[in-house]
């Protein structure tokens, strides 16, 4: 590949938000936004001795367009408990990838996808004592074509002094494989892998934070343990000799 190669990434979004108190200490909020992303890559390769007389060029394009709606409701449940309920829906209207050789023209990939995602979330905050608070949250996510995935988190917050905070955290995070991992192919060295599963991380941590005044916070290195399974490994398909993402 020569230094004449270049890539361009562009993205933008438009967001509309609304919030309103509906009862004493209770609040309703909603967000709607439209998101767009475009990728354009030009890859110029030096000629292969004995096979080519000039440089070859390959172009890759990717387009993404989606809209998202999120609603949440916060309500105190008694003097020592506060609850947050949220739902979210995302419609990925366009998830397209194109790959072709320029001279001579040779189409390599023309993939067009559209998916939908939804999620529901509930979190409770319990004030055990004036200096001790427990947060517990549960979230379920559904992303086509994958199965529904629940995640959970716990956070214990201890404030022995007005400006000192100690946090014990346990949580899970979920990441679905993206379109590139599921569907991209160049018919030269890479083939798609439609059988990828989700990637779920489990983490545990201890955090200490000190307010030294003037809006300045000091936090020493965190004690953190993360169990992060690999979403995918690159393996060679024995039938095609291509790399499976």
Image (spheres, rainbow, N blue to C red):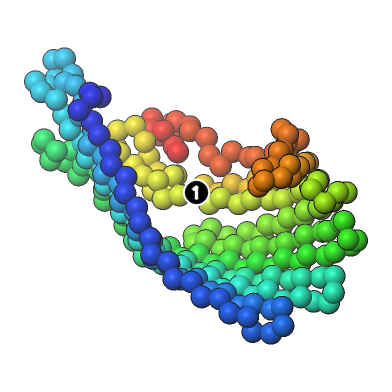
Residue 118 higher or lower than 40, as above or below:
below
Residue 55 higher or lower than 32, as above or below:
above
Q: What percent of the width, then of the height, locates residue 117?
A: 50, 64
Few, some or many C-alpha atoms within 10 Å of disc 1 (few <14, some 14-19, many ≥20)? some
The answer to whether one can see residue 30 in this image is yes
* Residue at the spot 81% in from the left edge and 70% down from the top edge: 81
Kindly give the residue lying farthest to the right in the view shown: 129
Q: Quadrant of the N terminus?
A: top left
Q: Quadrant of residue 23?
A: bottom right
* Residue at the spot 63% in from the left edge and 80% down from the top edge: 21
Viewer-proximal residue, 90 or 142?
90
State left or right for residue 180 relative to residue 139: left
The answer to whether one can see residue 203 in this image is no
* Residue at the spot 40% in from the left edge and 46% down from the top edge: 180
Q: What percent of the width, then of the height, locates residue 115?
A: 43, 63
Q: What percent of the width, then of the height, locates residue 37?
A: 34, 54
Q: What percent of the width, then of the height, locates residue 158?
A: 84, 51
Where does label 1 land, which residue? 177
State left or right for residue 142 relative to residue 34: right
Q: Quadrant of the C terminus?
A: top left
């Amino acid at each position: 590949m020569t230094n004449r190669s270049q890539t361009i990434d562009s993205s933008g979004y438009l967001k509309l938000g609304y919030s309103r108190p509906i009862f004493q200490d209770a609040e309703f909020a909603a967000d709607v936004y439209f998101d767009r992303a475009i990728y354009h890559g030009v890859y110029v390769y030096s000629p292969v001795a004995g096979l080519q007389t000039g440089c070859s060029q390959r172009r890759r394009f990717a387009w993404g367009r989606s809209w998202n709606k999120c609603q949440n409701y916060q309500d105190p449940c008694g003097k020592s408990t506060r609850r947050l309920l949220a739902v979210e829906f995302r419609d990925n209207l366009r998830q397209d990838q194109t790959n072709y050789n320029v001279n001579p023209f040779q189409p390599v990939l023309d993939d067009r996808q559209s998916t939908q995602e939804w999620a529901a979330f509930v979190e409770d905050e319990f004030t055990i004592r004036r200096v001790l608070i427990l947060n517990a949250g549960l979230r379920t996510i559904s992303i086509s074509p994958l199965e529904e995935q629940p995640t959970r988190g716990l956070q214990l917050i201890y404030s022995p002094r007005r400006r000192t905070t100690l946090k014990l955290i346990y949580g899970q995070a979920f990441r679905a494989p993206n379109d590139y991992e599921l569907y991209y192919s160049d018919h030269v060295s890479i083939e798609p892998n439609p059988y990828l599963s989700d990637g779920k991380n489990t983490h545990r941590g201890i955090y200490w934070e000190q307010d030294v005044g003037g809006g300045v916070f000091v936090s020493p290195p965190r004690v953190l343990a993360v169990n992060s399974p690999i979403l995918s490994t690159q393996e060679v398909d024995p039938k095609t000799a291509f790399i499976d993402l």
